[in-house]
Image (cartoon, rainbow, N blue to C red):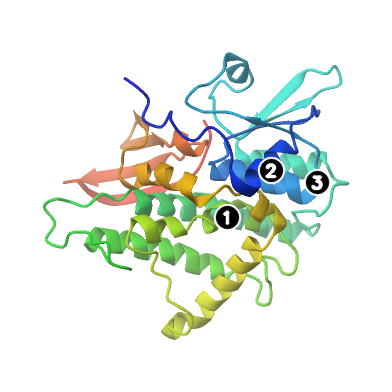
Amino acid sequence: MPVPDADIHPEATGPAKALVASHQAEQPLKFYAGWFCPFVQRVWLALEEKQIPYQYIEVNPYHKEPSFLALNPRGLVPTITSPDESGSARPLYESTVILEYLEEAYPTHTPALLPKDAYLRARARIWIDYVTSRIIPAFHRFLQHQPNPASSTPDTNQTGGGGDELQTLRAEFLATLKEFTRELHPQGPYFLGEELSLVDVVLAPWAVRLWVFDELKGGLGIPAPGQGAEEEAVWARWRRWVAAVEGRRSVRETRSEREWYLPIYQRYAEDKAQMTVLPTRPTVIRNRLAFFGEMIPIMLLKSMNKHWLFYGYESDW
């Protein structure tokens, strides 16, 4: 039986295609990537911001070459390799691990994406973890929600609409964005102030994909400017942060054309994407979202098909 996600568009398009073409020359650092993957884009942003030389190698995670599996038996992107003193390739994977490695291994490549101050570095890591453990799982719960046929309030395609469960998931996702936004530097425009940091980098790929909810889930639900009532200041600050992130050259040039993302996200929104579920004890479902490269294990307690507890965190295991 064919793998449902194996027919994804094979290469980057638009600005990202041009960037890929400019990074085909042999380099010590190899960047194994999938153009569509937000975890890949995290690493790609850091490489571009710091201007670290790299060779881009496209990987289809549904057609894994033996040579790639030899580097990463999990077969996931992003993966990088950097040679040791003997010239042997040393692989690393999982986006946040790679981001920290790039900061430490290339200290002369600026800008530094973690502050020098020990307290600020620790605080940055707290909010990097928040993005990974709270925002991204809420994003996927909202995106993958399927209407309950027995529900008296079925999902709709009206902006901000949907059944009770969809509305709840929308509100939960927006709550994570508001909590993140309240921690942003007051003037900014970035999380720590005037300079981009890894906190911004880890969330940026999802921030620039929020349009999928307007296309597929009846709307994201963020109020329009001037309509945020008592939360107007929070959403105004959020919009400033998004605008600053979207304006970065690295973000613009690592994005493909929207039309090629949409069918992939639509399969997720319709719960048709490839997924491998590995149950563990007690009542834990590890939900391998291989489409997005890394894995997001989801801890889930269920009763009568209702989620009593749904807590997710991104990890690569």
Dividing the picture into quadrants, the one containing residue 192 is: bottom right
Foreground disc of the pair 3, 2: 2
Estimate the x, y position of residue 309 in percent, counting from the top left: 32, 50
Visible in this render: residue 167? yes
Real-space CA distance between mark 1 and mark 2, rounded to the nearest whole angstrom:
24 Å
Q: Residue at x 69, y 43 (%)?
A: 18
Query: Please, is residue 35 above or below residue 88 in the view?
Result: below
Query: In the picture shown, does residue 254 fall above or below 79?
Result: below
Q: Are marks 1 and 2 in contact (CB under 8 Å)?
A: no
Where in the figure is residue 286, as x and y percent of width and height? Answer: 39, 35
- The kind of residue on which mark 3 rests is Gln
* The label number, if any, that marks residue 26 in the structure image: none
Q: Mark 3, mark 1: which one is toward the viewer? A: 3
Which residue lies under the disc numbered 1? 203
Q: In the rendered view, does 105 fall on the left or right side of 21? A: right
**SS for tag 3?**
loop
Q: In terms of depth relative to the viewer, which is nearer, 43 or 158? A: 158
Q: Mark 1, mark 2: which one is toward the viewer?
A: 2
Name the residue carrying label 2: 18
Q: Is residue 184 above or below residue 205?
A: below
Mark 3 or 1 closer to N-term? Answer: 3
Amino acid tagged 1: Leu
Q: Residue at x 47, y 26 (%)?
A: 62
Determine the residue positioned at 35% across, 42% down. Answer: 267
Residue at the image position 42 percent from the left and 76 percent from the top: 223
Residue marked by disc 3: 51
Residue type beneath disc 2: Ala
